[in-house]
Amino acid sequence: MNQQELIELIRYFCKERDWDQFHSLKDLSIGLSTESNELLQLFRFKDDKQCEDYLMNNRKKIEDECADIYYYLLRLSDLYNIDLNQALENKMKDNQKKYPKELVKGKNLKYNEYE
């Protein structure tokens, strides 16, 4: 399925359950944050090797959390008319300016740390 088909699937799913009433901008943002933190929780207190091992042995759990995050992001963008593709394209243009390759190549500095 492409992104638009997934949005339609989510719309139908929510309409059947009368969930629009629960999907305010605030509540969807909270849901997005909550699901992101559930993904983060899977890796808490693990070093890089343990994280890789966890991924190999628990891929379904990680995929489920990623899907939950994607669901909330698609739902929020659909209900509040955010073109995610255009938003990402615009953000990447901003990032090119914020992080000029000449100054940050091979470095993990935030934009206010190298100026």
Image (cartoon, rainbow, N blue to C red):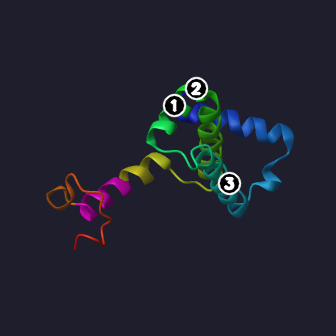
> Which percent across, then down, holds residue 64?
65, 34
Residue positioned 53% across, 45% down in the render? 46
Specify the quadrant that holds the C terminus.
bottom left
Task: Tell me the residue that label 3 is attached to.
Answer: 34
Task: Tell me the residue that label 2 is attached to.
Answer: 57
Q: Main secondary structure of the magenta part?
A: helix
SS label for mark 3:
helix
Q: Is residue 105 left or right of residue 72?
A: left
Q: Is residue 67 left or right of residue 100?
A: right
Q: Amino acid at mark 3?
A: Thr
Of mark 1 and mark 3, the one earlier in the sequence is: 3
Residue positioned 37% across, 56% down in the render? 90
Range drawn in magenta: 90-99
Give me the disc on residue 53: 1
SS label for mark 1:
helix
Q: Is residue 94 magenta?
A: yes
Q: CA distance from mark 2 to mark 3?
A: 23 Å
Of residue 64 and residue 22, the one placed in the foreground of this image is 64
Q: Are marks 2 and 3 in contact (CB under 8 Å)?
A: no
Residue positioned 48% across, 45% down in the render? 47
Of residue 29 and residue 40, the one placed in the foreground of this image is 40
> Which percent across, then down, holds residue 52?
48, 34
Q: Amino acid at mark 2?
A: Asn
Specify the quadrant that holds the N terminus.
top right
Within 10 Å of disc 1 (Cα), the crowding (few <14, some 14-19, many 20+) is few
Q: Are marks 1 and 2 in contact (CB under 8 Å)?
A: yes
